[in-house]
Image: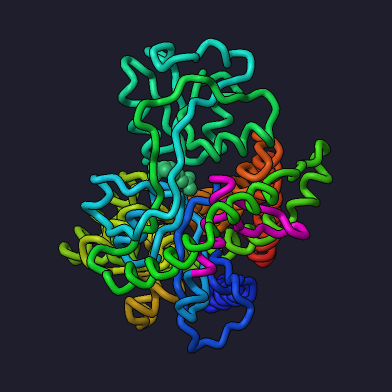
Amino acid sequence: MLRLKRIIPMLMALLMLALALYPGHGHAQQQNASSTSEKKTITVGLSADFAPYEFMMTVDGNSKIVGSDVMIAEEIAKDMGAELVIENMSFDSLIPSLQSGRIDMIISGMTPTDERRQNVDFSDLYYISRQVILTRSEDVDKYATMDALEGEQIGVQTGSIQEEIANDIPNAQVTSVKSISDVVSLLTSERVNAAVFEGPVAESQVNNRPGIAIAEAAPEDSDTPMAIAVQKGNTELTEQINVTLERLRATNAVDEFIRQANELSSGEEAPSNIFSFFWKYRGFYADGVQYTLLLSALGVLFGFLIGLLVALLRLSGVKVLKWIAVTYIEVLRGTPMLVQLLIIHFGLASAFDIRFTVLQSGIITLSINSSAYLAEIFRAGIQGVDRGQMEAARSLGMPRGMAMRTIIIPQAIKSVLPAIGNEFIVIIKESSIVSFIGVADLMFQANAVRTLTYSGLYPLVIAAVIYLIMTLILSKLLNVFERRLSAGDNR
Ligand code: ARG
């Protein structure tokens, strides 16, 4: 007969496995090899989709974040005697991450607008660029003036100043997406006809991709500066940054960085065969799988334990406890997991100063979300156990708790095992939403490869196949487990 005692070690084993697989320091790249733990670190946030300023490159199948902004970050770290850690995330997550203290500064081609200045402080300017209009090559003559863009479908990156520029074009239908590579995909797949871009970024795109071109139309007053953002009131850091920027300015270093970065960004050619494609980017996927397994294993473990507890509360004849359990279940089942994730990650940080790392936020969200579903599964299982079982146990003199633990729950879990298995599979798949806050899981890595290669299909198909392999293995294991358990049954 199935005993709780046997399930717990199994879950523990899962936990061990997950910890053994734990890749270490978040997905942050330790740029500096010398990592004495006392050494001060500075964490720079960026959105690595913005060649030549910040973008990803593959080196021996592994991802590396490079670009002129990264070179500036390295100089700042050097001057501060600190180790540089880079956090890659979506552009619109940068300011919330800085405000909640998860990163020390943003170097991501960010323009110091008045609106942003209300939330963060900026260093001196380090570069001035201009805005251009990117279109498909065949349409390039159509957009000679800004007037031609009126009422047009335009693509931009969410939270960028390009979004504001596009919104100011009369009647424009603006589509905002997370990353610059998605903007380019919108354009090439003819979902939009034009896109507002930072000049050097547009040039890098044009040089590396066929079929797109820069139009003659140019937004007015389009000189836009870039500066480094730090937390509001952190004048000490701002001053330190300005010293480095001043040093770089004296030698025109930033122009040189941009030139070097442009050289790096050309020539990443993605294989046209899906197998060699996978092989080339295997390092990304391998990293991602580790996080996905870790998140799912811990999500399952904590979800299981919390779920069981909530089910027992719900069934405990005590009114208040029951009410708490029902509320917990209803709230968690009735709200989107993405909303829960964002509340836990950004909401708690800004309202109560509770700052979980991206990984912690991901694990907490997955655990509590699945615990709500598991609680209902357990409840059904417990209620399905014949009443006579409890009565018999009690009449043998067993205390209620002991009867629950040794007689009822094991039978309950056994009967709902297929439903629990389903929930585990759901967790593996749903763990993909943590990529939203920047956990470098399988989904995140697939997006990274997408950004890197501009290939819309292969990176996602490969991720889908890997998810499928994981869930198939899990359901096989669950089948074996179930069969083992029923081997001794003579029902
Ligand atoms: N300069 C623009 C802005 O401040 C766009 C920056 C986008 N940066 C990026 N790494 N995607 O809004």
Question: What residue is drawn where x is 24% and y is 54%?
Answer: 119
Q: Nearer the viewer, residue 13 or 102?
A: 102
The spot of residue 114 in percent (x, y) is 24, 45
Up the image or down, 407 lies above or below 424; here it is: below
* Image x and y of residue 142, in percent: 53, 10
Between 457 and 429, the one lying in front of the other is 457
Instruction: Give the quarter of the image for residue 156.
Output: top left
Name the image quarter holding the N terminus. Answer: bottom right
Any magenta on residue 55? Answer: yes
Whether residue 223 appears in this view of the structure is: yes
| Residue 63 left/right relative to 403 | right
**Image quadrant occupied by the C terminus:** bottom right
Seen at 28% across and 61% down, the residue is: 314
The image shows residue 308 at horizontal and vertical percentages of 40, 66
> Where's residue 186, x and y in %?
54, 27
Q: If the picture is divided into quarters, which one holds ligand 1? A: top left
Residue occupying image coordinates x 41% and y 17%:
146
Asked if the magenta segment contains residue 434, the reply would be no
**Residue bounds of the magenta highlight:** 50-75
* 197 vs 39: above or below: above
Residue 314 placement, left or right of 182? left
